[in-house]
Amino acid sequence: MQTWSICSTPTATAEREMQAAEPPKIQDLMEYLSAFFHGMPVKLFKPPFQWQKWNKYDGAILTPPSTQHRIGLRTPGDRLFGIRCRASPDGLSPMQVNLDDVLDGLAENIPANAHSIMMLLDLDMYEGDGDIFTAGRAYGGSRIAAVSLFRDQPLCAPPGDGHAWPASHCAEYIDKLCLEASDEPPTKKKAKLQLSFRCARTGTSGPLDRAIEAAAQTTAAAEEEASSSGISRPARLDTAASTTAQWLGRTAVTMAHELCHCLGLDHCTYFACAMQGCGSVAEAQRQPPYVCPVCLEKICWAIGEGVVDGWEEDRGVREGFVRERYGKLRGVCERWDGRMFVGYKAWLDDVLEGIVERGDGVVD
Ligand SMILES: [Zn+2]
Ligand SMILES: [Zn+2]
């Protein structure tokens, strides 16, 4: 099944990037999740899940794509589950596994001392017959989740338009997306709306502005380096280190999102937030890695109430918890290159400075 995790239709540019990029490492993902869910231990579940033959089917690539089969998943409890599988409708992955079936296999393996269990797959996943792929899903009530890192690899991710978070907050870019999404016929005004790579918000200063500025500096430095070495647009500008960091970052953010569902959080409809619902890789790249104040409050209560001593009695304990959590996240971000981590660190720097100035743990 090794070939199932290899993207089928790479472009030459993406292939070059892919050769240089490293897939997310489990230890790095666990470090991010430990910071995000500060206060709760994040542990690697070691007993193995193993793919194997199901009846006589051994994992050969199926054609035509509409053909569906089952592949065996042997769980640590020594039960064999038949997982539906198929070739991906868009041809990007050789084969995909059915998410619901994977979660069924996972459900009976939640350790007695664990709150939730999550499986990370390098294979592509799908849910219903009608969808193309699913990057992650949690059954929050059952405290089980599965995430695939397949679609965030450089070979699969859609070519960047220069507006992944934090540049997704660029006013011009948002106008353009809104126009594209509206049903109105194109007008001269719309035709004139050209996107620049200059991202700006007007009249604001705060964590998000710091994030945009820091990420823009990274982009400018990459452009300078590319032009001095003779690489011109539209070649991608990312270095191996930043591509690796982007892949790690997107996977970590998806894992945190799904685990938040296991803590009881629903999708966020209030602000730009890592708990917003998401329908595509492009949309996921526009969303922030942090949670909004509403969702932060939910996470803090979900973890703090059960895990942190003195939570109920002392408001200062809660404020200290938020500060420590942000500090841990900043420690993770500063280890990584790439626009998301660079922007996230700048955002955290500003938030933490604000906490110190106000002398509390409340983030506006
Ligand atoms: Zn979700
Ligand atoms: Zn939120």
Image (tube, grey):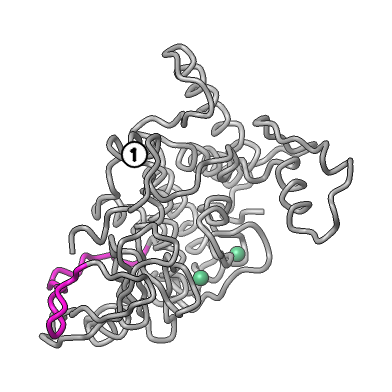
Residue placed most toward the observer, 281 or 342: 281
Residue type, numbered disc 1: Glu
Q: Is residue 34 above or below residue 17?
A: below
Q: Is residue 167 above or below residue 329?
A: above
Give the residue at x 39% y 55%.
251
Give the residue at x 51% y 68%.
314
Q: Looking at the rendering, which quadrant does residue 171 occupy?
A: top right
The residue identified by callout 1 is 15
* Outermost residue, right side: 188
Residue 135 as seen in the image, left or right of residue 72: right
Q: Can residue 123 be spotted in the picture?
A: yes
Residue 200 as seen in the image, left or right of residue 329: right
Give the residue at x 46% y 65%.
257
Q: Position of residue 113 (x, y in %)?
A: 24, 80
Q: Position of residue 347 (x, y in %)?
A: 56, 42
Residue 293 as seen in the image, left or right of residue 308: right
Residue 87 counted in the magenta span: no
Q: Which residues are magenta?
A: 39-60
Q: Position of residue 277 (x, y in %)?
A: 57, 67
